[in-house]
Image (cartoon, rainbow, N blue to C red):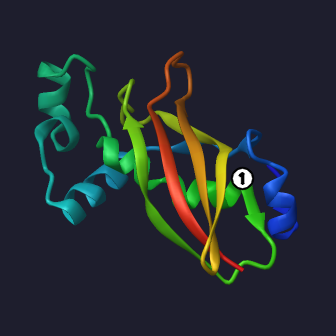
Amino acid sequence: MAVRVIHGIEELRTLVGEKLGISDWIEVTQERVQAFADGTDDHQWIHCDPQRAQRESPYGTTVAHGFLTLSLCNSLVRQIFRIEGVKMVLNYGLNRVRFPTAVKVGSRVRMSSELIDLKETRGSVQATFKQTFMVEGEARPACVAETVVRIFF
C-alpha cells in the first residue's frame, strides 16, 4: 500500500474526522509473542505455552498480549501516513483502549487510522487518532485505541 503524504500542518487540519488509511497485514508469530513476553516479563501460559494453550485455552492456541497488539501502532502508522515538515512526534498518552477480540498466534492483523481531534499547543499540535486493529477473518476488532501524540513542526 502507498503511504499517504500529508503536506504539513495546514493539510493535517483539514483531515480531522477522516480515515487516513489502512496498513498492510502482518503476521503475529510465536517468536514475536515470546520476544514481547521476554521484554515485559509477562510469560503467562496463554501467550507462551503452545501445548498448554492447545489443551486448556478457549482459543485452542496461544494468543498475543493485548499490549503487544497496541505496541504495533507506531510501526503500522508509518505504513499509513507521514506528515511533511515534522521535527518530532512524542507519544502523549491514550484516552481509551479496548481489546474486543484475541489475536491468535499465526493470524494476521492490520490497522486503520482516523484523525479524530487536533488542538494547538505551545510549540506543537496535539493530535488524537482512533487506531483500529483488525484480525484477518474476524468480524470484531482486536484493539480499538485512541492514541494522543504531540507533533512538533
Q: Which residue is mark 1?
A: 80
Q: Residue at x 15, y 52 (%)?
A: 42
The percent position of residue 3, horizontal first and vertical second, equals 80, 57
Residue 46 location, quadrant: top left
Number of marks: 1
Position of 76 relative to 24 (above/below): below
Q: From the viewer's perspective, is 62 left or right of 78?
A: left
State left or right for residue 62 relative to residue 79. Answer: left
Label 1 crowd (10 A; few <14 / some 14-19 / many >=20): many
- Give whichever of 107, 41 is nearer the camera: 41
Q: Position of residue 77 (x, y in %)?
A: 63, 55
The kind of residue tagged 1 is Ile
Which quarter of the picture shows residue 131? top right
Q: Quadrant of the C terminus?
A: bottom right
Q: Quadrant of residue 119?
A: bottom right
- Is there any visible trace of residue 3 in the rendered image? no
